[in-house]
Amino acid sequence: MAIFEEVKGLVEDFGVRHKADISALTARIDEFEAKGNRPLAPSGGPDSAEITAAEKDHQTAFQAFARKGIDNGLQALEIQASMTTGSDPDGGYAVPIVIEKEIEKMLRNESPMRSICKVITVGTPNYHKLVNKGGTTSGWVGETQERPETSTPQLGKLTPYWGEIYANPAASQQSLDDLGFDVESFLAESIGDEFTEQEGAALINGDGILKPKGLLSFPTDTAGDKTRAFGTLQYIKTGAAAAFLAASATVSPADCLTDLVYSVRRPYRKGAVWLMNSNTLATVSKFKDAVNGLPIWQRGLAEGQPSTLLGYPIEEDENMPDIGAGAFPIAFGNFKRAFVIVDRTQTRILRDPFTAKPNVHFYATRRVGSFLQNHQAVKLLKVSA
C-alpha cells in the first residue's frame, strides 16, 4: 500500500511539474490540425500555398481597400502578413499573397525569358554580384615542392540595370460594388498582362535606362571567348547580307546554325536552348542539312515535349527581331548561366477614384532588373555577309 501511494504521488508530481509542457504540446498539435484544414490559395496546382491567418486578414482588408478605398489598419496587416517591412503607404499597398502569386505565375508562364533565364529576388537596391573575369593561374607541383603564389584574380562587380514597371487598369465603381465581381482575379490578370508585355520587350531590347538592359543591348564582337572583352557577346554571321546563304549541293543555309551551336563551349551546351520569334522559326524549320537533305527541325513527339532544332529545344519570343540586314534574330546557349532577372519588391497598388470618375484606376508598380553574368554561355546569330 505504501508503494502504491508513493507511485501515485510521483505521477501527480510529474503532472504538476510538466503541466505547462503538456499544454504547449496540445496547443501545437491543435495548430497543425488547424493548418491542415485551411483552404488553399485559389491559384491552384503546384503553386498553391497555405494561407496563414495573417495573410487571410490582409487579403480581407485589401478587398475593402480595392472596393471602397477603406485602408484602416491595412499597413499593419501588410507587416503581419510579411508582405512589407512598413514602407510609406504613399508608395502604394502591397497586394495580397494570392494576387502576387498569380501575377508571378503569369510572368513565369507567359514570359519566355523568365522561363529560360535565372530569376532571383533581392531585398535591397544596392545588390551586386562579384564574378571572376579571369587571371587566376594554376599548375602542377610535386609532393614536396613549394606551392608558388597564384596571381590575383580579376574580379568584376555586376550591378543590375533597374527599372520600375507599372500598369494602370481601371474598373467601374459599379463593378467594384458588385460582390460577385472577382476583384482579385481582375487585378491579377490585368496587371499580369501589362507586366508581361512590357517586361518581355525590355528583357530583349531594353536600353538599361529606367528599365532592365535587354540581351540584345549588350556589346557584341566576333572574337572568341579567350580574347573577347568581358561582358561582350560573340556573334556568328549568316554569310549573306540580308538573309541566310542560299542552298546548294554542298552548302546549307543551316550551316551557320551548326557553327553557332559549337561556338558555345561544351559545359554550356548542356541545358542550352534556341531563342527566336515565330517568323524566324518558320524559316529555319524548313532548312535541311547539305549532306543527307534531312530536316534540322524536329517536332516534339509527345504533348508538352518541345520541338528541337539540331537537337536543342526552341523557345519562341516575339520580341526577338525578324530576319533582316544587321539583325540578331537568333540566340543560342545556356541562358540560366548567362542572364539574370532580378525582382526587388512585390507588386504595390495605389487606388485612384478621382481621375476618371466613375471609374477607379489601380496604379500598380514593381521593381525589376537584369544583368549579364556570363558572356560565354550565350551566343548570337547576326544577319551579315
Image (spheres, rainbow, N blue to C red):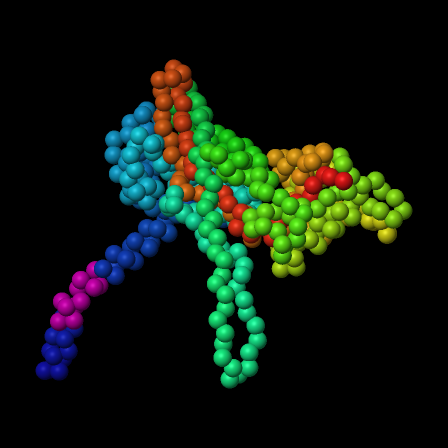
> Nearest the camera: 163 or 59?
163
> Nearest the camera: 333 or 40?
333
Q: Is residue 48 magenta?
A: no
Asked whether residue 180 appears in the rendered view, the answer is no
Image: 180 above or below 215: above
Residue at position x 32%, y 41% in the image: 84
Q: In the image, residue 108 lies at what x, y percent?
A: 52, 42
Q: In the image, residue 188 lies at what x, y percent?
A: 45, 33
Q: In the image, residue 166 lies at what x, y percent?
A: 45, 30
Q: Most extreme residue toward the right, as rendered?
A: 249
Residue at position x 18%, y 67% in the image: 18
Residue at position x 44%, y 23% in the image: 170
Q: Most extreme residue toward the top, as rendered?
A: 357
Magenta stretch: give its range: 13-23
Side of 37 where 160 appears, left or right:
right
Q: Quadrant of residue 91?
A: top left
Q: In the image, residue 344 lies at what x, y percent?
A: 41, 42
Asked whether residue 83 appears in the rendered view, the answer is yes
Residue at position x 29%, y 27% in the image: 70
> Nearest the camera: 26 or 63?
63
- Quadrant in the picture for the C terminus: top right
